[in-house]
Amino acid sequence: MQKDSFEFLKSLQETPSVSGFEQPAMAVIRQRMKSVADRIETDVHGNTIVVINEKGSPRVMLAGHCDQIGLMVRLINDEGYLYFNAVGGVDGTVLPGTRVTIHNKRGPVEGVIGRKPIHLMKAEERNNAKIELSDLWIDIGAKDKKDAMKRVAVADPVTYRLGMERLGDDYITSPGLDDKVGAFVIMEAARLAASKKLKCALYAVATVQEELGLRGARTSCYGVDPLVGIAIDVTHATDNPGADKRIAGDVALGKGPVIERGPNINPALGELFEDVAKKAKIPHQIDAAAGATGTDANAMQISRAGVAAGLVSIPNRYMHTQVEVVSLTDLENAAKLIAETVARIDSKMDFIPR
């Protein structure tokens, strides 16, 4: 991966973007894309829309959600400890002992998530694998409530401590790879596509609040009104000891982006992706998405009178934890696949299922 792309990815991963609080990360995207976009706008919902070749036809929308799961301060007690709610699908079992950052308007505040030590638990507590968020708290080292409120406030968003690290030669690990790598890929694809003679109008949208129900994709797709909508998200890698390929399919890091096929995917667009990947010799994998996917592709497919939807997935290990893992090569190949596919779309192409 070229240096400027890697630095863009790193900056995106290390900028907070809890659902509903995505604008710091959106600013990183706007800065990156201003040199290639015809225009960039942010809608009332917070989606960032990068437009290239606006007078082309048909309209093609790329969607990668920029929000990450997180927490939100719910209560500051008299002793200065913070109780919290989950924002999105947080796994309570990974929270105890986690280092977190509270993002206050005056600046970030570091904290740790505590719980009752195992030595002090009753037998039934030790044997109960389920962890209730109400049994956990954030310790910021405050003396009392007054001291804590000098630094944090109720409704402040909270992230796992952010930081992207290399694992071996090709892998990276970070919180929030779901799905800031998707936002990264669509912007890299748009950058690559901008150098081609596009016939279509391209709208690369970093969407908001996907983790709360595909909300940003619903509103932005309605506004853009594309004929074709392509989502980029992560999918579960099954190349690790905890995965059951009988349930989740055979998906591995480093073997290329995953082209999804199924009811959520327009048949013509799915075939186009496969044809482009084969002719351009782009490594790829195929996965069966047997129903409505839990991605922005779902929201786009049923927008207005319907959109020809596609989904390209990035294999991801340990989803919704502090240590998600993806392959840099997969990210590069996903951007190439999408850029090459977009370059093939013109007003003569028929997406009506036959």
Image (tube, helix red, strand yellow):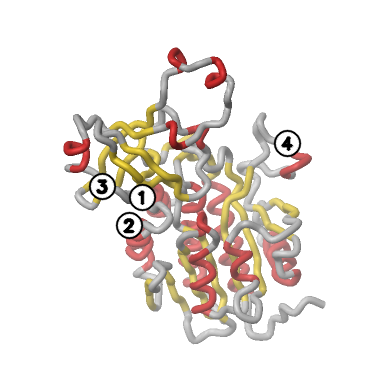
Q: Point out residue 129 in the picture as x, y percentages from the top left corner.
A: 58, 27
The reply to whether discs 4 and 2 touch (Cβ–Cβ < 8 Å) is no
Residue at image location 49% in from the left, 67% down from the top = 190
The residue under label 4 is: 244
Work out whether residue 107 or residue 346 is closer to the camera in this orientation and state it.
Answer: 107
Distance from disc 2 to disc 3, alpha carbons, whole Å, reads 19 Å
Residue at image location 76% in from the left, 56% down from the top = 290
Q: Nearer the viewer, mark 2 or mark 3?
A: 3
Give above or below for 340 relative to 315: below
Question: Mark 4 is on which residue type?
Answer: Asp
Question: Mark 1 is on which residue type?
Answer: Pro
- Earlier along the polypeptide chain: callout 4 or callout 2? 2
**Mark carried by residue 24:** 2
Q: Residues within 10 Å of mark 3 (few under 14, many from 20)?
A: some
- Earlier along the polypeptide chain: callout 1 or callout 3? 1
The residue under label 1 is: 16
Give above or below for 171 relative to 69: above
- Earlier along the polypeptide chain: callout 2 or callout 3? 2
Distance from disc 1 to disc 3, alpha carbons, whole Å, reads 17 Å
